[in-house]
Amino acid sequence: MKVRVPPVKCQGIKTKLVPWILSNAIFPKDGFWIEPFMGSGVVGFNAYPERAVFNDLNPHIINFYKAIQDNLITPSTARKYLSAEGERLKQKGDEYFYRVRERFNQYHDPLDFLFLSRASFNGMIRFNSKGEYNVPFCKKRERFSKAYITKIVNQIAHIWRLLQIFDWEFRCGDFEEIILMATSNDFIYCDPPYYGRHIDYYDKWDEAEENRLFRLLNNTPARFILSTWHSNKYRKNSALDKYQEKFFITTKEHFYHIGAQEKNRNSILEALVMNYPPPVPTVEQSARQLAFFEDRASYSISAFSGEENSS
Ligand SMILES: C[S@@+](CC[C@H](N)C(=O)[O-])C[C@H]1O[C@@H](n2cnc3c(N)ncnc32)[C@H](O)[C@@H]1O
């Protein structure tokens, strides 16, 4: 399947895992696709559900998509804005980036949010303990070339068109409220921050949050997938133990780089927890059969071929 990348990226974006996640999802026939932790939205957007609720604690992500929905941001206003601001960045460099950052931290304009996310170091979004955007400049004053602007505008145009067709709601709030709304007709895709990974104003996660999420998922009448990590070469995710008792877990090895060098290639075993048997055959299907600390290659590396498409 062709995975469409959204206009704003976030920490822990699941672009490469979308085909695997969607091939394991059960599509809601009459209900809603519910995403309590939407982040970039890459999973749900590529699922093309008729009806969906996308939620996040980060108001800037939600305001950005609401602005597209309300036609405050359209492909043409985005192009106009990025061309003008990109030109100023080219003229003034660093100083201009930090001026937009200050302006955003004061007024929270969703177009400034887009500008920052696309001109920041590594294209990431991060907020300090006061809730201020604090990623530094990527140091490329010619960042907004014509081709780059067209790429971003196309990403916005894609979402803008989907919002004309589908009944999607964007909400800002805590995950609990959204999960409690779910009925047996709905499907929940949950991708919380990974415990101990990133600390950010909107992205805090600790054991208490982990337990709160477990209680909610344990009681929901909806079907769900929870994305998490299973293990890396140093340790395993002990938070999975409690899910293992009752639910199904399937895993897939995922490679990522720290920096550009090949020697810094690392792998992590990603996990999907489901409250129904995985529709994609795995070497072993039941979570109860998974034994932590066995040779990784001997169990449950997904047999997903990448050909199944859920849209
Ligand atoms: C790992 S990211 C989601 C990534 C997303 N699936 C993607 O592929 O881009 C986790 C998201 O959870 C949000 N978040 C953190 N705590 C939350 C909470 N208590 N309620 C709702 N969202 C929360 C963060 O703002 C962040 O966007």
Image (tube, helix red, strand yellow):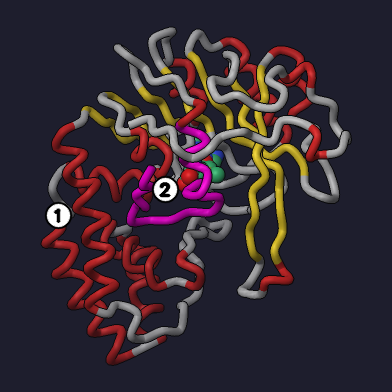
- First along the sequence among labels 1 and 2: 2
Q: Ligand 1 near label 1 (Cβ, under 8 Å)? A: no
Which disc number belongs to residue 74?
1
**Is 166 displayed left or right of 124 in the figure?**
left
Q: Ligand 1 near label 2 (Cβ, under 8 Å)? A: yes
Q: Main secondary structure of the magenta part?
A: loop
Residue 140: percent from left, percent from top:
41, 84
Residue 88: percent from left, percent from top:
25, 84
Q: Secondary structure at mark 1?
A: loop
How far apart are the alpha carbons under marks 1 and 2? 18 Å
Neighbour class for label 2 at 10 Å: few (<14), some, many (≥20)? many
Do the residues under discs 1 and 2 have CB atoms within 8 angstroms?
A: no
**Is 210 displayed left or right of 154 in the figure?**
right
Of residues 83 and 150, which is closer to you in this image? 150
- Figure quadrant of residue 264: bottom right
Residue at the spot 37% in from the left edge and 79% down from the top edge = 97
Amino acid at dot 2: Ser
Q: Which residue is mark 2?
A: 40
Residue at the spot 28% in from the left edge and 31% down from the top edge = 169
Magenta stretch, residue numbers: 1-22
**Is 134 displayed left or right of 33 in the figure?**
right
Determine whether 283 is above or below 149 in the image.
above
Determine whether 112 is above or below 6 in the image.
below
Residue 95: percent from left, percent from top:
38, 86
Which quarter of the rendered picture does the C terminus lie within?
top left
